[in-house]
Image (tube, rainbow, N blue to C red):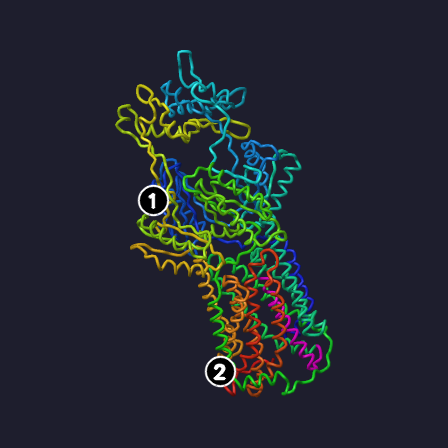
Amino acid sequence: MKLVVWLRRHASLVWIAVLGLAATGAVSIFQLPSGIYPEMQFPRVIVVAKAGQLSPDLVEAQMTRPLEQALAIVPGIRHVRARTIRGAVELSLLLTDGTDPLTAQYACQAAVDHVELPRGATTVVQRVLPTSVPVITFNVSPRGAATDLRRLREVAERIIKPAIVRVPGVGGVEVAGGRVRQIQLLIHPLELAALHLTPSQLAQKIEAQDQVIAAGRVWDQHQTLPVVYDAQAADLAQLRQLPIASGPAGPVPLSAVADVRDGNEDPDVIIASARGEAVAVSVARLPGASTPAVVDGVRGALARLRAGHTLPPDVEIEPVYDQADLVDQSMASVRDAILIGIALSLLVIAVSLRDWRAGLVAAVPVPLTLLGTFAVMRWLGVTLNLMSLGGLAVAIGLVVDDAIVVTEGIVRRLEDGHPVAEAVELGTRDMFAAVIGTTFTTVVVFAPLALLTGVTGSFLGALAVTLAIAVLLSMVIALTLIPILAGRLRQRQRRHAPSDTDRISRVIRWLVRHRATAAGAVVALAVAGYAAWGGLGTGFLPQMDEGAFVIDFFLPAGTSLEETARATATVDDMLAHTPEVAAFTRRTGTELGPATATMQSRGDIMVRLVPRDRRDGIRAVIDRVRDALHGKVPEARFEYVQVLQDVLNDLQGAPAPIEIQILGDNPRTLESYAELAGDKLEKLPQLADFFNGREGQTPILDARSLPAQLARLGVDAQAVGADLSIALAGREVAQVLRPERTIGVRLRYPDDVRYDAEALARSPIAYGPRALPLGQVVAFDRPLAPAVLRRDGLRSAVLMTASTRSGDLGGAEAAVREALRGVPVPPATQVEIGGQAASARGARNELVGVALTAVVLVLLILILQLHSLRYALVVLIGAPLSTVGGLLVLVATGIPLDVSSMTGLILLVGLVVKNGILLLENAQHHVAEGESLQAALIAAARRRLRPILMTTAATLAGLAPLALGLGAGSELQRPLAVAVIGGLTLATLVTLVVTPGLTVLLAREPAVHAPVPPA
């Protein structure tokens, strides 16, 4: 063979190329960015608009509907969802496939800018990025005695945040909680009215005197001197002396009508830890940055702050969530699985060939291939994550396959008595076509994965690219390096030729004569596969033990921020006394994830658990926490989800496993249907944490204008509204300059007036010729308003949610559909089931399409390889038959049919046909030499039995560590490995038992084929 001759002459060149690639890969391992998941782009843009304390119905009328109508016609937007709460609306915009999220963000921003919103409204347009989620979160809390929460916030903002921002790879630092320092001017309504001033007039007087003006410049002694007119108060004392009116005794200072004090802004978020109230600092990474590198940089920055005594000694920094720990543990777990798989595969080779030299020849290409794969990954921009490394772990058996087939072919020629050089040439020629054909059948199976979209496409794309790189590289190295290495094998004694009466001959002869056995086996396996398919549960992505989870809590609508924090403090106490909990942080009034509109009666608790070896599985821990919280806070509703799963759900816009959307044009009709449906659904044993979607109503204090009274007093409604706004929310009227920052000065009423409706109504205000109570110019009422208003596709909506008890999304969805059949749907009302269940359903449908495409591509490869459609069909029939083994093992182990396990079943298509190619390609050679089909099958089975058994055993050994699911993150690849092991085990029996009989049934006798190279 010319290739072998060329390789002998240029062995040094081959070694330099292979070792150079491997060395590049070894260096690349330490340079590739690493993280839990692949870099993904989510086809979703979020728009959040806020406008003070407007009631939800007013927000919907003045903001939600105009925004959704403007955004619905933006190119690339396929669906609009809206959630309206008091003072804010959140719109989730789903993009069509192929739309660039960054372009869509700019287009949405342009559309929002043209919408006329209420005065003072603010908007945020943000595309959804996984890097917006923190990779490390820690609490800044007092050590020992209580510390001023304003000081804690300043330490976080002015000392910790600048140090972290300078770390390479950091994409954002968010500081939440504590108190923001503010100078407060607390009005005395009675004294202010006595001066015949209103809050708005007082604000204007203060603003008029808080001036810093660049007046111009002057020339003096050949210098240009800028002239700055500075009328700002420098401290609280100067603010107190600020004249705001003239009286009989002279100017009236501000202190006569208001208390001037150092205070803080009204908190809209409360952060708590086991130590009490705290400040939370969350750090996100830039796209493409390595999670461990960023986290290590943050840790180093904090360590330098402590070492340099820059951090105050009474401030404690406590880690709450550290994604780098999970990344490191998961990478170590996959690394161990790869190393164990290599060791087991090489053991199979050594035992099968009974020759340590031949075993070494087959073993050397394996680590070189894996190292080379890292080099190609770096060139292609593939990151190290659980899916790409999982692809490498899965590839172990496939990489070993090529080395085994070529080495075994050479050893077989040596056993036939050929000299070493001749054996190398003949053995390589024998297996050359088979190795290329089997490699490309595996690669084309994964090519259609490029058609997948969303999270499924990102996850499986990373696995498929890595696997394809490894397999193609193993083919090249096996066909170039092994012939060089095999030149050092020793001559063997000629092996005794097998007789026609040996065991293999008798079995194949019997199967050929009783060809109905093959047809019976096909029918039996089809029935077994159908039964197994029906008994499988379904899911989306495998759940892994992240070592951390989130508790989302919901109190009744209208509950104040302070009362929500007080009520959920019970949860803090329970978690602090739970031995599995290492740390936690409670966020009240905000949520983990991308930009959102959050009510003050809601929040979440991020819980970090102790290491895995000191606790049970995370599902058991969550169940215990759920049981412990049951009844602790009767008015609260809780939901439980792991951190990364919660993040993925939020990024996709499907935060619950099961979502039942009720769509229509009449909100009352939707509420009535939700009540009837909820009564049935909450009784389903398949569901947990069920919520019927009825958010309830929230009380508001409606201040109505009295036009006739205002007209008599000569006051307009705008002035009254401005005064009321200053009294309640306040207005920033000045700033005080401090070193490197400014502190806002806010004018408002004191808390005992603005937080008491009756006191507010009694407070005097200077309208008309004399002061009168505010209640005489404004009518106060206490109506109820909807707490949350939802819209989906420009229609009103009610959203019911639930999680599953067993993880079987398909079973839970079927139970929900069955229960809803008994609830009549009102006219013009539509019911849809979404959430993760819909994502899983869509992913399964896409994967079925991938599988069908893969089958067609494999068939084309087989026809090119075997030169016969009949033989190609015989080989291909083994693929669906072998998947029965995968289905049966999935049922036996209780693993659902999810993205990972279905990928394993698809991979089987490429793996199974390898055995058929090895068998029938050799049989064709014997038929071409004039042998009968029966004799050809017997000879091929005898010749190819050992490589078939060796490659199967090596692949099973390589996948065994993944199937055991040991270590962090292993849960993602375990379903795939289990499905492949079950299918491949059965595939060997199908190749040796079913394929010969089917060949005789489908092939013609005698068969006429184009000459093929001997094998």
The answer to whether one can see residue 229 in this image is: no
The tag earlier along the polypeptide, 1 or 2, is 1
393 in magenta = yes
Within the image, what quadrant is residue 971 found in?
bottom right
Q: Which residues are magenta?
A: 391-420
Query: What kind of element bears circle 2?
Result: helix
Q: CA distance from mark 1 to mark 2?
A: 67 Å
Asked if residue 208 lies in the magenta stretch, the reply is no
Report the disc number at residue 249.
none
Residue 297 in the image: above or below residue 995: above
What amino acid type should be assigned to the residue bearing mark 2? Leu
Residue 66: which numbered mark, if any?
1
Q: Position of residue 812 (x, y in %)?
A: 44, 59
Task: Say which quadrant the C terminus sits in.
Answer: bottom right
Residue 821 on image: x %, y %: 36, 60
Label 1: which secondary element: helix
Dot 1 amino acid type: Pro
- Graded by Cα atoms within 10 Å as few (under 14), some (14 to 19) or many (20 or more), the crowding at tag 2 reads few
Q: Quadrant of residue 256?
A: top left
Q: Point out residue 917 in the picture as x, y percentages from the top left corner.
A: 56, 76
**Residue corresponding to mark 2:** 1002
The residue furthest top is: 249
Dividing the image into 4 quarters, which one contains the N terminus?
bottom right
Towards the viewer: 127 or 874: 874
Please determine whether, in this image, residue 352 is positioned above or below residue 774.
Answer: below
CA neighbours of label 1 inside 10 A, class few (<14), some (14 to 19), many (20+): some
Up/down of 894 relative to 766, above or below: below
- Residue at image point 62% right, 41% down: 301
